[in-house]
Every structure is written in C-alpha cells, then in structure tokens.
Amino acid sequence: MLKFIFNKTFFIQAVVALGVIILSVWIILSYLNSYTLNGQTVTVPSLKGLKPSEIEETLLDKNLRFEIIDSVFLAKSEKGVVVEQYPAAEDLVKENRTIYVTLSKVVPPKIAIPDIIDMSSRLAIAKLESYGLKAGRLDYVPSECLNCVVKLTMGGKTVNPNDLVDKGSTVHITLGSGTSSEKIPVPTLINLTKNDAISALQLAFLNVGAEIYEDCKSSADSARAKVFKQSQPANSIATLGSSIDIWLTTDSSKINITLPAVVE
C-alpha cells in the first residue's frame, strides 16, 4: 500500500490534480470578482432638483445610469425635476448601476370641480382642498341662503361643478349674505403665518387684503414670517366679505400678542 502511495506515477498524477483544482478555484474566483465588480463601488450623488439632461451629466463620471419610472404633480415643486430617487443619495452601489428617479410633472393633471353649490362655506372649502384645489376670495351677494355657496369663479368667469381645471387651481367662492348686512368680529391674526391667517379669516367669512412683509429677504423668510399687525384689530366688527390687511415679519420682538382694547 505504501509503495503505491509513494509511486512516482501516482505522485505526478496527484500534483497535476492538485494543480488543476487550484487553477479551477482561481479561475472561478477571478470570474466572480470580475462579474460582481468586487470593491468597485461608487457613492450615489443627490439627483433631487435636477432635470434629465443634468442627471445624465452628473452620473456620467461615476459610470452610473438612470431610468425615469414615474412622474407626480407637486404644486410647490419646480416642474420637470427629480423629486425622488432610488438608491438614495450617499448609498454605495456597483458601477453601471441604474438609479431610478421620479420627476415632478410639467403639466398639472385635470380634475373635475366638485359640486359644492349650496354647501356651507366651511364644508365647501374643505371639499375643494380635498380635491387638490385652493379656495380663493370669498365674495358675498344678497341671498336667503346665508353663508352657503351661490357661485364659483376662476379668472373672472363662472365655473360649474364637473368642469375640468388644472389641479392646484384657485377657485373663488361667492356666498349668500342673507337678507341683511351681517356684522361679525374680526379674528386674532397676530403671531400667525400667512396661510394660518388666511384660514382664520376664511372661517370668519372674511378675506385677506394686502400682505406687507418686513425684514424678509428671501422666500424662506416669507414662508416663516408671522403677522405682527392687522388693519382691523381683533374683536372689532366687520361686514361679511371684508378684506383685512396683514403685516408680517421674522422679527419676533415686533410681535405683540396682547389684544388691543376695542373702542365701542
């Protein structure tokens, strides 16, 4: 038995077999290493806010590709740019990986105006917003239907339920004022953002008038600015549909939330 093991022919065959095994393993590992691009990873750049032509330029140097998989309408977003991406920015991926992106739609989708005629103003505004529309100015006309929707307008023209309009459009609402000139108290607007002030006025059947900004140097400043003055003081009496001017600032020291006394 030992003679067979130490036989020269057997020894040569064993060495050849071992060499074949080592070579085969090396070839397989080299192939897998090449196939998976082992160690050759790149960092995914942020593509948000870029247009398709800019995406291609950004990914070219990193040997990455992209594919547009969806588009969504976002009223406040720049049109035709990336709003979502996968894999996310800063993720590590292999070269030649495809980055999937979602763009913001250039043209807003059309939607039908909901039937809000004869609804109360509060319910009508809520329904418009649920459809992706904005409630604009509240106007009043004499009508037995107090604070209910009489007419809808856009761009000075009457629109009707089921008319198709761009999503995000502003619809102005005409409400019934009843058979008398109703008076209502002005709400407190001090320390509210513009959007909150508009909502408060709408709930009180009033409109926002002029919007005057102080100490605001950018759109970001304007967005976080708060009301520090209103043209009619809180709890004073106004007529339905009146407009209240507001002054806004980012300087909190100008905001005095103490309500002024109302002169009878």
Image (tube, helix red, strand yellow):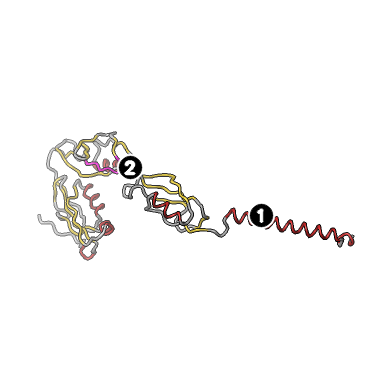
Q: Which residue is mark 2?
A: 107
- Location of residue 165 (image quadrant): top left
| Residue count near mark 2 (Cα–Cα under 10 Å), binned few <14, some 14–19, many ≥20 | few
Residue plotted at (63% across, 57% down): 30
Task: Report the magenta residues as a range.
Answer: 166-173
**Helix, strand, or loop for circle 2?**
loop
Distance (Cα) linking label 2 and label 1: 52 Å
Give 102 or 135, whichever is nearer the viewer: 102
Q: Main secondary structure of the magenta part?
A: strand
Relative vertical location of residue 240 with respect to residue 60 in this rendering, above or below: above
Rendered location of residue 122, percent (x, y)? 25, 43
- Number of numbered discs overlaid on the protein picture: 2
Tell me, yes or no, whether the two marked residues, 2 and 1, touch with CB atoms within 8 Å: no
Number of the label disc, if any, that sits on residue 28: 1
Give 132 or 58, whichever is nearer the viewer: 58
Q: Is residue 115 magenta?
A: no
Q: Amino acid at mark 1?
A: Ile
**Helix, strand, or loop for circle 1?**
helix
Q: Position of 12 compared to 80: left or right? A: right
Q: Amino acid at mark 2?
A: Val
Residue plotted at (21% across, 40% down): 155
